[in-house]
Each structure stands twice: as C-alpha cells, then as structure tokens.
Image (cartoon, rainbow, N blue to C red):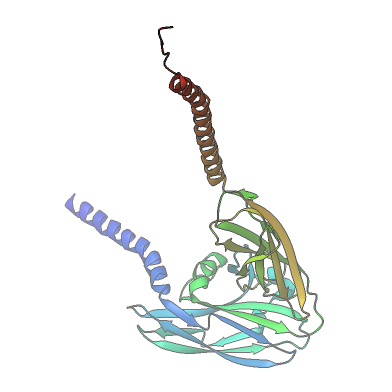
Amino acid sequence: MKNWKSRFNWIFLLAFFLLLAGPARAQELTKITVSPPRLEAQVKPGQVLQKVIKVHNGGDSEMALQVRIRDFIVSDDQGTPLPVKAKLARKWAASTWVQASPMKFILRPGETKKVDVAIVVPQGANPGGHYAVVFFQAAGSSGNSETASAVMPSVGSLFYLTVPGPVKENAFVIRMDAPKLVEYGPVKITSEIENLSDIHIRPRGTIRVYNWLGRLNSTIKLDEKNIFPGTVRRYDNTWQQHWGFGKYRATLTAGYGQQGRALVATIFFWVIPWHVIIAVILGLVLVGLGIWWYRRRNDKAAEEYPLTQQSTTITDNKQPTTNNGN
C-alpha cells in the first residue's frame, strides 16, 4: 500500500512538472529581444539583399532557439501582425524570398547572436508590397500557426519589402466619429482608414478643430501607422480642451503613398456646458428678483412718504387764534 502511494506521488509530481514546462518555456522566451523589430526596404526583381538580425537573451537561463520564416497579414484594426500560410498571403507573400542562417542555435544568458538574412527577389516579382516575418521560438516547438502567433509579437522581425513599378494606391476614411453633444471636453475622436492599395501606406496628417466662429482652435497630430493592403486601421485621438461652447468642426487631412494622394474627412460636435448655463440663468433670475423686490419696496415707501410729509406741513402751518375781547 505504501509503495502504491509512493508511486502515485511520483507520477503526480512528474505530471505537475510537465504541465509547468510549457508556461516556463514561454516565460523564458519573452526575455528574448530581436533587433531590428521591423525592416523596410525597396527591392528590385533579381536583387539580393543582405541583412543582419541581432537576437539577445535577457533571461537567466540558456535557450535553444530555431528560426521560422512566414508570410504575415494584419487581421485587426490595431495593426497586429499574424503569420499565415503562403496560400493565404497570395500576391503579398515574401517568405520564399527570405533565407536565414543559422536556423538553430543556443543562446546563453546575456548573450547576443547575429543571424544573417538574405533576401532573394524573384525576377518576376510583382510591383507592390510583399511581407514576411522572421521569428524565433524554442527549439522543438511544432511551429504551427497558434504557436507562431503566440511568440511572434515579442521575438519576431517584420520585413516590409516594396517592389517598384506601377501600383494601385487607393485609401479612404471610412469612419470618423465623435460624440454629437458633450458638456465639456476632452472629446474622443475615432477615425478608421481602409487601404485598398497594392502596397502598405503610412498616412501622415492632422486633425484640425475649428470653433463656431470658424477660427482654428487646436491641431492634433495623427499617429504614423502602417496600413497593409486590404486592411483597416483605427486612430484614436483626443481634443484635450476642457471648456468650450457652441458648434465645433473637426477636419482630418492626411497624405499617403508615392503619388501624393490625400485623405479628407470632416465631422461636427457640440459643446454645451448646460450645468453652467443653468447656474447662470438661475443666478440672473435671482438677481432680477432681488432688483424687482428692492424697487417695489422703494416705490411703496415713496407712496407712503408724501402723505406723512403733507400731514406734517399742514400741522406746522396752523396759526393760533387770538381773542381781542371784541
């Protein structure tokens, strides 16, 4: 009986440590840093481009790493890159162009290693944007899409490759929202830009806010974000002014692309500090009532005062009667 309990305890401890092994390895992997995290380059068909990625182990334990190369897309409006299969990436794929060496290596605590990357552009490469990610994961991992997605944001290097030539550049502001009516600021302004181009774009621009007189009130700079082909990117901006009054106009103006195209959108919102307005109205009403009451009291006093004065005058003017004995 004791032997059976002892064996059971050993089996339980072994299972427990096996369950902890996965999360522990993932935790160690988050201490791996990659430089540069992003690389943008313009390449020509038939060109070979040489680059270097530096991988650093900031943890306390030795890590065995392997290199994975995948195409990637952006699936949300925040610009989160996700590796996908080449069939899904279609004309924007670049994973087959990228080669890395070494593909496996040991990284000791505090050590930095260089990984040589060669980008071989095919002769028939289509003009436009092509995207790939070189990411690093613990050696022995399956390399499936779920694992890749989990480690890629913290230990990956993104490659943005542009092949020059005639490309379609087309983008729209598909949404620009703000509260229609607020009592006071700040006011959140949300915009969404959709990229229908053959290449990623990086709009640069501002949101200008004008007051009800048409005068410029403030200028808000748009964050510079890459927007990939066929995706939508959201921009969250804030008009920081606290006090305001009347109708305001917010106009987004931005430029993008190699052809100098423009994005323009306008919205309106009202700022009505109704608590303050009600307080002012009540204050004016109270002041008006006070003035009315004061004047009425004075008028009433004025009506009574002449009668009293007249009575006094008559009394003072009475002359005493003198009897002469006649």
**Residue at 55%, 52% in the rendered image:** 184
Q: Is residue 173 visible?
A: no
Compared with 73, 44 (above or below) is below
Q: Is residue 273 left or right of residue 254?
A: left
Rendering coords of residue 31 (x, y %): 40, 75
Could you say which quadrant of the image residue 219 lies in? bottom right
Rendering coords of residue 183 (x, y %): 57, 49
Q: How many marks?
A: 0
Compared with 47, 83 (above or below) is above
Q: Is residue 147 left or right of residue 230?
A: left
**Residue at 66%, 53% in the rendered image:** 269
Q: Nearer the viewer, residue 25 or 231?
A: 231
Q: Nearer the viewer, residue 175 or 69?
A: 175
Q: Residue furthest right?
A: 166
**Residue at 48%, 81% in the rendered image:** 34
Q: Nearer the viewer, residue 290 or 144?
A: 290
Rendering coords of residue 39 (x, y %): 59, 83
Q: Is residue 201 left or right of residue 26?
A: right
Compared with 223, 8 (above or below) is above
Q: Is residue 255 visible?
A: yes
Q: Looking at the figure, which quarter contains the C terminus?
A: top left
**Residue at 45%, 88% in the rendered image:** 113
Could you say which quadrant of the image residue 42 lies in? bottom right
Rendering coords of residue 155 (x, y %): 49, 76
Q: Is residue 253 left or right of residue 136?
A: right
Q: Nearer the viewer, residue 116 or 185?
A: 185
Could you say which quadrant of the image residue 122 lies in? bottom right
